[in-house]
Image (cartoon, grey):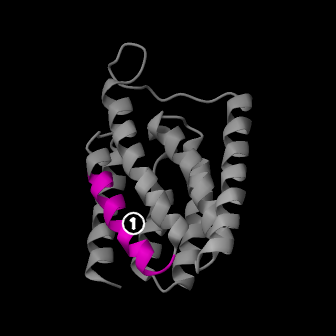
Amino acid sequence: MSGLELFAAALGVIAVWLTVKQNPWCWPIGLVMVLLYSWVFFEVKLYSDMLLQVIYAALQLYGWWQWTRGGDERLGRQVSQLAVAPIALSLSLGAIGSLALGAAMAHWTDAAQPWLDAALTGFSLVAQVWMAQKRVQCWPLWILLDVIFVGLFVYKGMYLTAGLYAVYPDRDPGLA
C-alpha cells in the first residue's frame, strides 16, 4: 500500500458518501480520485484499469454536468429506469469493448490479468454512464462488478483498494 493509494481510497469513500447523499460534489472529488488511481493502477500493471480511470475522469465531468444541468429542464437529472433494449445494447457494447481491450492487453502489454481487467473495464464504463444518467440499473451492475474487483485487488495485494470496493455495494440503490 502506498500513500497515494491511501489518499485515493480516502477520496473514494468521500465520493461514495456524497453519491449516496445525491450531492453533486461527488463528481469533482471523484475526478481527483480517479486521476490518482490511474497512477496506482499503472504501478501494479492493471493497465485496463489505468485507462478506465482516465476515461472516468471525462465521465466525472459528464456526471457532474448531468446532475447539475442535465434533464429536460436543465435542472439536473431525476432517477429513471432504462427499457430492456437500451440495457441489452449497452451490455453488448460493454462485452465488445471488453473483448477488444482484453485482446489488445494480452497481445501488446505485460498486463496482469488482461482479460479480467478488460472485462471489468468494459462493463464499468456501462455502469458509470448509467450512473451519470441516474439510471437505477447502474446499482446491480456496480455491485456485481465491485465484488469481482475486490477479488482482483486482493489477488494483487491492494488491500486498501479492495476494502474501498467492498464498501461500494453499500450504496443505496434508490438514490442513483
Vertical position of residue 111 compared to residue 86: above or below: below
| Left or right, residue 146 beside residue 103 | left
Secondary structure, mark 1, is helix
**Quick one: 103 or 138, which is closer to the camera?**
103
Which residue occupies 51% across, 70% down?
47
The residue that mark 1 highlights is 38
**Quick one: 167 or 39, which is closer to the camera?**
39
Residue 154 position within the rendered picture, expressed as x and y whole percent measured from the top left: 53, 82
**Quick one: 123 or 17, which is closer to the camera?**
123
Which residue occupies 48% across, 41% down?
131
Check disc 1 and give the amino acid type.
Ser
- The quadrant the N terminus occupies is bottom left
Which residue occupies 47% across, 34% down?
134
**Residue 13 occupies quadrant:** bottom left
**Span shown in magenta:** 29-45
Q: Residues within 10 Å of mark 1 (few under 14, many from 20)?
A: many
| Left or right, residue 117 beside residue 172 | right
Magenta span dominant secondary structure: helix
